[in-house]
Image: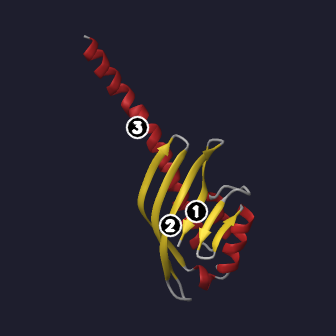
Amino acid sequence: MKSLLLIACLVFLLPAICGAQSADEKAVRQILTDQTTAWNAGNIDDFMKGYWDHDSLMFVGKNGVTYGYQNTLNNYKKNYGTPDLMGTLTFNLIKVERLSPEYYFVVGKWHLKRNAGDVSGHYNLLFRKIKGKWVIIADHSS
């Protein structure tokens, strides 16, 4: 009887537990979709909405480490300030892994098809749930 009760509890609780994880993963994936849409519309400000608006945001790129939301935004605008430089962005996700209820780790490949010459590379992102919202707190793109 106890075994039957335990199995019944698991049958009812498992979807709830998995559903919460799926909702978080869906939110993380949606941020990347929204970023792609914003980028391809030529809107760097909207693209940046996926990042943590904080001085502790960390972006690691070919020129080293940049700290802060505003500094990261300025770098994007400096390096991709025209439609020819922005081109069309695609992300290919390689791994989306929940590290804890508060963190997700994402690895992927990015590609820009553009008139100025195509470029591509890989990235890893650390997402954190802050005040109920998922945001990128660290980005290493190369």
Q: Which colour scheme is used?
A: secondary structure
Q: Is mark 1 on a helix, strand or loop?
A: strand
> Rounded to the nearest whole Å, what is the CA distance between mark 3 and mark 2?
27 Å
Task: Give the answer, above or below, for where 25 lies relative to 108.
Answer: above
Q: Position of residue 69 (x, y in %)?
A: 71, 62
Q: Contact (CB < 8 A) between labels 3 and 2?
A: no
> Rounded to the nearest whole Å, what is the CA distance between mark 3 and mark 1?
27 Å
Q: Quadrant of the N terminus?
A: top left
Q: Contact (CB < 8 A) between labels 2 and 1?
A: yes
> Rounded to the nearest whole Å, what is the CA distance between mark 2 and mark 1?
7 Å
Q: Can residue 35 be seen in this view?
A: yes
Could you tell me which residue is drawn at 49 percent across and 54 percent down? 105
Which of pointers 3 and 1 indicates the residue nearer the eye? Answer: 1
Q: Which mark is residue 123?
A: 2
Q: Where is residue 32 in the image (x, y as percent from the top left)?
A: 53, 60
Seen in the image, is 6 located left or right of residue 126? left
Q: Position of residue 23 (x, y in %)?
A: 48, 43
Determine crowd level at label 2: few under 14, some 14-19, many 20+ residues with C-alpha closer than 10 A.
some
Q: Which residue is disc 3 drawn over?
A: 18
Q: Is residue 111 visible?
A: no
Determine crowd level at label 1: few under 14, some 14-19, many 20+ residues with C-alpha closer than 10 A.
many
Give amino acid for label 2: Tyr
Q: Which residue is disc 1 drawn over?
A: 139
Could you tell me which residue is drawn at 56 percent across and 80 percent down? 87
Task: Give the answer, above or below, for where 80 lies relative to 12.
Answer: below
